């Protein structure tokens, strides 16, 4: 009889542990199913009456004297990525590049070639133009059309080629990083 009691006790503990797991994981499901929220840090305050570039939106913001820029956040659409470049906000205000348009090398994206041109104005990366990109029909074209705008936005926000790989577009992301890194190396 003791062995049957032990079996029931062990079974009850397992069932309780399973229900506890369901309850705890159920509370996390709502955050996993919601769109990813990205929060950007604003650059350091600029001199009075100067224009600084907002990291989260890419728009210009006029800051009155003595007013620090605010931080902003936005909803990410489409595939989610994370930017591991912790110094992105600081890089925005440093003016680290020479003005001009710089063409990066052609990089192999497995399904085709990718080449970008980096446009620098006011010492900042302001645009990334795609000179070549994988254009095979069907799935490859869809992935390219989805990934390239995300990569472009991240690069401009980060002021760097060090952007996260877009899920499902690993080769395209890596080719983008290589080509943009080559272009930005010329701008230094």
Image: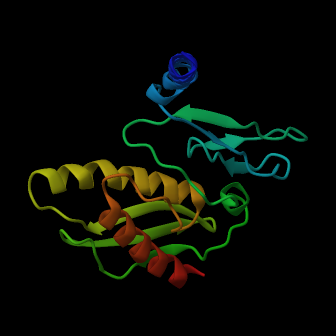
Where 9 falls versus 140 (above or below)? above
Relative image position of residue 136 (x, y in whole percent): 11, 61
Relative to residue 165, is residue 126 drawn left or right?
right
Relative to residue 91, is residue 161 drawn left or right?
left
Q: Along the line of sight, which residue is nearer the eye, 80 or 15? A: 15
Q: Along the line of sight, which residue is nearer the eye, 84 or 47? A: 84
Relative image position of residue 42 (x, y in whole percent): 72, 45
Name of the residue lying farthest toward the right: 66
Relative image position of residue 17 (x, y in whole percent): 56, 23
Relative image position of residue 30 (x, y in whole percent): 50, 21
Where 9 falls versus 125 (above or below)? above
Relative to residue 40, is residue 69 drawn left or right?
right
Quadrant where the N terminus is found in the figure: top right
Q: How is the image coloured?
A: rainbow
Residue 160, located in which quarter of the rendered image? Answer: bottom right
Quadrant where the C terminus is found in the figure: bottom right
Q: How many marks?
A: 0
Q: Residue at x 15, y 51 (%)?
A: 139
Q: Residue at x 37, y 38 (%)?
A: 78
Where 118 falls versus 80 (above or below)? below
Where 13 falls versus 78 (above or below)? above
Q: Residue at x 43, y 59 (%)?
A: 165
Name of the residue lying farthest toward the front: 1
């Amino acid at each position: 009889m003791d062995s049957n009691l032990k079996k029931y006790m062990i079974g009850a503990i397992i069932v309780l542990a399973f229900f506890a797991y369901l309850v705890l994981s159920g509370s996390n499901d709502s955050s996993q199913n919601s769109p990813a929220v990205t929060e950007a840090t604003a650059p350091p305050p600029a001199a009075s009456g100067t224009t600084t570039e907002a990291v989260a939106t890419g728009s210009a913001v006029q800051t009155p004297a003595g007013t620090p820029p605010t931080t902003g956040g936005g909803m990410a659409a489409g595939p989610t990525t994370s930017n591991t470049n912790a110094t992105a906000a600081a890089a925005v205000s440093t003016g680290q590049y020479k003005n001009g348009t710089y063409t990066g090398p052609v990089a192999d994206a497995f399904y085709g070639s990718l080449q970008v041109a980096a446009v620098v104005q006011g010492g900042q990366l302001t645009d990334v133009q795609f000179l070549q990109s994988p254009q095979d029909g069907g799935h490859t074209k869809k992935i390219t059309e989805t990934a390239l705008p995300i990569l472009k936005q991240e690069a401009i926000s980060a002021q760097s080629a060090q952007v996260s790989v877009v899920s499902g577009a690993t080769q395209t992301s890596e080719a983008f990083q290589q080509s943009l890194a080559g272009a930005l190396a010329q701008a230094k």
